[in-house]
Image (cartoon, rainbow, N blue to C red):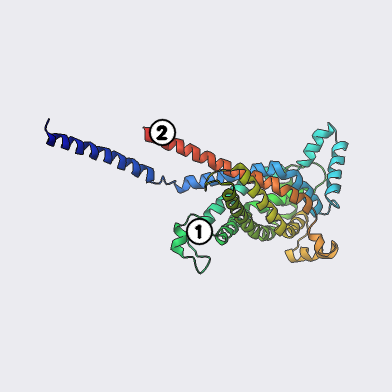
Amino acid sequence: MSDASVEVEVELEQGLLGGVQQHQDQNNQKPHAKSPLVENLQSLVAGGVGGVCAVLTGHPFDLVKVRCQSNQARNATDAVAHILKEARAASGPASVNAVRGFYRGVVPPLLGVTPIFAVSFWGYDVGKKLVTHFPFSASESTAANATKKELSTAQMAAAGFISAIPTTLVTAPTERVKVVMQTTQGKTSFADAARQIVRTQGFQSLFKGSLATLSRDGPGSALYFASYEVCKEFLNKMSGHKSGELSITNVCISGGLAGVSMWAVVFPIDTVKTQLQSSSKRQSMVEVTREIYRTRGGIKGFFPGIGPAMLRSFPANAATFLGVEMTHSLFKKYEQRGRGASTLA
C-alpha cells in the first residue's frame, strides 16, 4: 500500500470519527424541550402531591386553630381538651375517636387539596414565566431576565402573588365548607355541609370570604415562594449542593421556614377570613375587623390560635415542598431514562 493511500484512509477515519463525535456533542448540547402541556401537567401533579402531604401533616393543628379563631375555645389547650372530651363521650375506643376528632373536617381539604395546591404551584410556575418578561429594577433588562434562569427575589415574590389569583377560586369555597364543618356541633359530611350552606344562604354563599382569602393568599404566597427559594439557595450554597440537586434536608428546612414566615405575616387576615366564613351573617371585611377589635380586646384578638398555627406551619410546609420536589425529581429521572433509552436505540 502506498503512502498516499495510507494518508487518505487516515483522513477518512478522522473525518468519520470527527463527524460521529460532532453528532454526539450536538445531541448532548441540544436541549430536550418539554411541551407546555407536559410542563403544566407535571406542575399540577407535583402541587397535588405536596398538598396531600401538607393536609395529612397539619390538619390537627389547623383544627385547633380554627376552633380558637371562631371563638369556640379560649386557647389551644382548651380546644384540645374539648376534642378529647368529645372523643371520650363518643361510643367506641377513645383513642380512635380522638384521631377522628383531630381529623374532623379533613375531607374538604383532601378533596380540595389537589386542585388548590396543584393550581397554586402551577400558577407559580406560570408566574415565573410571566415575570421574566418584565424588569423589576432599573438595572435589570427584559432581555437579560428572559434568558436568565435565576429570578430576582422581587420576581419570585411577584410570581407567588400571581399564583394566588387562580388559587382563590378553588380555595374560597373549599375552606368555607371546611370552616363550617369544623365549627358545627355533631357529625356532618362535606356534601351535607355544602348543601346546608346553599339551601340556607344561597349558592353565592359558598364563595363568602373570597376577598379575604385573596387578601391573605396574595401577599402570603409572595412571601411563601420567595422565602423558600432564597432560603433553599442559601442552604444549598452552605452545604455545597449544586443548583438543581435535591437535598431533602434543605428542602424541608426551607419549606418549614417559608410556612412560618408566611403565617406570621398573614395570620390576622386569616382570622378575619375564618370569622367571615364561619358566620351566617352578611358582613364585610371592614365590619368583621372592627367587631374583632372591639370584642376581643384589640390587636391581640387577631391572633387566637397562633400557637397551633405556628406549630403546624413548619412540618406541614416542609412536607408540602418535599412532596413537590420529590415528584419533580421522579419526573426528571423518568425523562432521563427515556432519553437514555432513545439514545441507545
Give the quadrant of the C terminus: top left
In the orientation shown, which residue stands out farthest toward the top?
1
| Above or below: residue 170 compared with residue 268 | above
Question: Residue 54 falls in which quadrant of the image?
Answer: top right
Taking the image as shown, residue 40 lies to the left or right of residue 287, namely left
Q: Identify which amino acid the numbered label 1 is placed on.
A: Leu
Q: Nearer the viewer, residue 150 or 49?
A: 150
Q: Distance from label 1 to label 2 (Cα)?
A: 34 Å
Taking the image as shown, residue 299 lies to the left or right of residue 205, namely right
Q: Position of residue 248 (x, y in %)?
A: 61, 42
Q: Which residue is mark 2?
A: 341
Give the quadrant of the N terminus: top left
User: Residue 78, labelled with which disc?
Assistant: none
Mark 2 crowd level (few <14, some 14–19, many ≥20, 10 Å Cα): few
Residue 119 visible in the picture: no
Q: Identify which amino acid the numbered label 2 is placed on.
A: Ala
Q: Position of residue 129 (x, y in %)?
A: 50, 56
Q: Position of residue 121 (x, y in %)?
A: 58, 50
Mark 1 crowd level (few <14, some 14–19, many ≥20, 10 Å Cα): some
User: Residue 130, labelled with which disc?
Assistant: 1
